[in-house]
Amino acid sequence: MRPCQSKRPAIFSFCTDPETLGTFRWFSCYLTNGVHWVFYLSFFKVLLLLAITAPVALGFGFLGAMAARSHFLPLSLLGKGYIAVVRGVPDIAFFMFFVIALDQAFEWTRHQILCPEWTDPIRQGNDFIVCQAAKLPLGTAPEWVHETYGFFLAVITFSIVFGAFAANVLFGGMRAVPRAQLETAEAYGMTRRQTFWRILVPQMWVYALPGLSNLWMVLIKATPLLFLLGIEDIVYWARELGGYKNPKFTQYPHGDWRMWYFLALLVFYLGMTRVSEIGLERLMRRLSHGQATSGGELLRKETTA
Amino acid sequence: MSCLQTIQDYGLRSIGIGERLLPRNDFTLCEQFTLIGSGMIWNIYFGIMALVTGYFLATALAMGKASTNKWLRKPAEWFIFLFRGSPLFIQFFFAYFFFLSLKQSYPFLDALTSAWLGALIVLFFNTAAYSGEIFYGALRSIPKGDIEAADAYGMTGWARFRRIVWPTMLRLAWPAYTNEAIFLFHATTLVFFSAFPVWQQRGDALYYAGYFADKTFNPFIPYPILAFYFILLTLVVIWSFGRVNKHLNRHLPAEKRSKMKLKLNLAR
């Protein structure tokens, strides 16, 4: 149990002695006590992760797709390999791999820069030892730095994995742009670079959008994996708060309610999915407007009929 | 200790046969390969069982969703939305705690809280929902002429379904279904990282990979081994589904029987 149980004063005045309350009032006190505010805050952690990861992953995906299209063989192999490997291996394995690997990569780099006089090997048997100054975050750093660093690692990990998915989608989108468009650009004497930025990129989004919206859904559904990366997210708090609470240690004793907490998370995610579905449908409608695709044709018929 | 000896000791460790204690220090490459490979038994078990059982429910769900009867359509739609709209990870957690409370009321349901059955049920429902949606999409794109031809021949009900609708549905759905199968195998790695307990350290491949990464603090060996196994598994899945695809398309003229294009859409 965390000591922050009573960090925040209860918002209802009748909450001073929960044992005397009726069911409804008991729940209104229980659901607004200190730990529950931390729980509600962790929902914002999930939304924050989504808000940061989506654009960064899109950026990674764009780079990956550009690399895969490249005429320079090693670069194209790198891009294709990035897409293929992440696609062939369970994403959770990547999450677990990258969190440790990134952490060690950062510490190793800092170690090389900050402690050049260090001669001992960094890997000693089963240990990974860097000098004190290279530790990330520093041993003396306050708690929030540790938490932010963990979150930062999680964001990069999510971005790398979902960047590969996005690269796959964007690569497909780029190839779906009619070849004639590019040939016309060449006929006008545009360079490869100009063709790419002026002709290909503006047109590929319509083709990539179905894949990207699918990807957004997948990303939403991957957010609970934050828990595995050691972040105190909604899954962590649902387990923590739902577990059996002994009357000796808490004002609000209850049995094992984890099932109900996870039911609440299930409903939260279903709501997120539904809202995204509606939003993406609207976006697709707007983008298809006036397009020479079957979706655009359908819209035209609707308005003329 | 020779590698052959290691394989004898740990090859079937994940199902409880062989050496009781896991290696504790001086991990050899052979030990890591053997144990992670041994864990793959669980991934394959979950994947195949869920696929085989889920296939039937998926067909039923697709038929239900395509039905004109509200009482069949609505439950199928809700089932598919429920399992496709929420993360599998949360489904595992919820199901485990649900089974736990069931067990307290009905002790004979004990087996539900262990991974081999409880997690399998969740995976079964999950893959049924995803494949149900795929089959539903395929049902809707069956050429109208096929159905009309069946009607003209006087086929109705079961005969029409078995001979016309069902084979065409499968043929249309097969590439997407292959993709779903690949993702299902990937999803099996979540089982032991959600609530389901690992009994006597009999875990799946990712569990052992995580074990080695924890002990050696070196992720660069166990996870690539895991990746190797999974890429191998993915290739086997693609190959065997490709064989079935060939069978499904055997009546088509050769030039139409183009090789299954694996458009790797993100099914999940």
Image (cartoon, coloured by chain):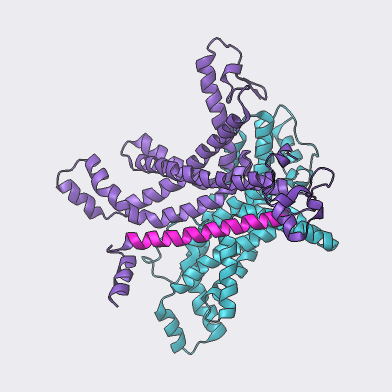
Q: Which chain is purple?
A: A
Location of residue A81 (image quadrant): top left
Image: A267 above or below A198: below
Residue A260 drawn above or below residue B203: below
**Location of residue A169 in the rendering, given as x and y in whole percent from the top left corner:** 41, 51
Give the residues drawn in magenta, as a range: A259-287
Quadrant location, the N terminus of chain B: top right
The residue most toward the left is A188
Question: On screen, A120 above or below B81?
Answer: above
Query: Is there any visible trace of residue A261 in the rendered image?
Result: yes
Chain letter for cyan? B
| Residue B34 horizontal side relative to residue A153, left or right | right
Asked if the magenta segment contains residue B90, the reply would be no
Which residue appears farthest toward the front when viewing the image? A13
Give the prevailing secondary structure in the magenta stretch. Answer: helix
Which residue appears at 30% of the width and 73% of the height?
A303
Residue at 60% x, 67% y: name it: B79
